[in-house]
Image (tube, rainbow, N blue to C red):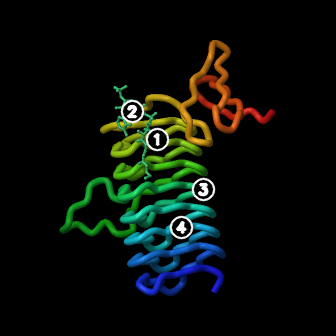
Amino acid sequence: MEYFVHDTAVIDAGCQIGKGTKIWHFSHIMTDSIIGENCNIGQNVVVSPGVVLGNNVKVQNNVSIYTGVTCHDDVFLGPSCVFTNITNPRSAINRRGQYAKTEVGKGASIGANATIVCGHDIGNFAFVGAGAVVTKHVPAYALVVGNPARQVGWMSEYGHKLLFDKNSESICPESGEKYILTNNTVIKVNV
Ligand SMILES: CC(C)(COP(=O)(O)OP(=O)(O)OC[C@H]1O[C@@H](n2cnc3c(N)ncnc32)[C@H](O)[C@@H]1OP(=O)(O)O)[C@@H](O)C(=O)NCCC(=O)NCCS
């Protein structure tokens, strides 16, 4: 086996799990889910049927990733963050098969205890602050905090706030990479 599964974890039939991935205590990987390479699935995590996780996805403890959620490569899911997949659940009404989709873009981070109300995508490298409640799409590189989550800035791929100068340019203090803000959209410039 090219991946690690702790003795207490449960892996259902029909899952695909990539090389180098680690699945820790009491986690449950459900049928037909796909987990990429070099992922870390922490303690007490549920990956529901049909969920797709890319490569190098890090899932901290106590996260349930419900059917309808897709996380692209390098996504970070903070401890106890919450996904949802039905907007208007009622116990007596069966809405199985009507799950809203949530896509978490490459390199995005979701802070501890944040809640993503379903049907809202998180853009590439976006950053959702701890405890935020996301009720709208989050643009690529955006930093959002609070309940309801509001955009308070932009974050670099290395996770630093981007402060744009009069030319709408910003340099990440860690990577030295340059970003440009145009029409309320951030792009990284390859120099
Ligand atoms: C959002 C975040 C990245 C901002 O970090 P930062 O730039 O260092 O922020 P600061 O501490 O300088 O705070 C700036 C302001 O934002 C507020 N703020 C910071 N984080 C916030 C959050 N999650 N929700 C609401 N407001 C927040 C601060 O209170 C402060 O407000 P003020 O200017 O009115 O005093 C960080 O606070 C955060 O939530 N990180 C996620 C941590 C996490 O969940 N990690 C999981 C792995 S263990």
Q: Earlier in the sequence, mark 1 or mark 2?
A: 1
User: Which residue lies at the image location 63% right of the left edge and 12% below the top edge?
Assistant: 166
Distance, label 2 to label 4, CA atoms, is 29 Å
Q: Is residue 190 left or right of residue 169?
A: right
The number of numbered badges drawn on the structure is 4
Q: Earlier in the sequence, mark 3 or mark 4?
A: 4
Q: Disc 4 residue type?
A: Asn
Looking at the image, do the residues carrying marks 3 and 2 touch, with CB atoms under 8 Å apart? no
Distance, label 4 to label 1, CA atoms, is 26 Å
Quadrant position of ligand 1: top left
Q: Quick check: is the Cβ at mark 3 less than 8 Å away from ligand 1?
A: no
The residue lying toward the viewer, choosing from 82 and 21, is 21
Badge 1 is on which residue?
A: 137
Q: Position of residue 93 (x, y in %)?
A: 23, 66
Q: Position of residue 153 (x, y in %)?
A: 49, 29
Distance, label 3 to label 2, CA atoms, is 23 Å
Q: Earlier in the sequence, mark 3 or mark 2?
A: 3
Q: Nearer the viewer, mark 2 or mark 4?
A: 4
Badge 2 is on which residue?
A: 150
Q: Quick check: is the Cβ at mark 4 less than 8 Å away from ligand 1?
A: no
The residue lying toward the viewer, choosing from 99 and 140, is 140
Q: Disc 3 residue type?
A: Asp
Q: Quadrant of residue 98?
A: bottom left
Instruction: Indicate whether 33 appears above or below 165.
Output: below
Instruction: Indicate whether 181 appears above or below 147.
Output: above
User: Which residue lies at the image location 54% right of the left edge and 58% below the top edge?
Assistant: 71
Q: Disc 1 residue type?
A: His
Looking at the image, do the residues carrying marks 4 and 1 touch, with CB atoms under 8 Å apart? no
Q: Earlier in the sequence, mark 3 or mark 1?
A: 3
Q: Earlier in the sequence, mark 4 or mark 1?
A: 4
Q: Is residue 71 visible?
A: yes
Q: Secondary structure at mark 3?
A: loop
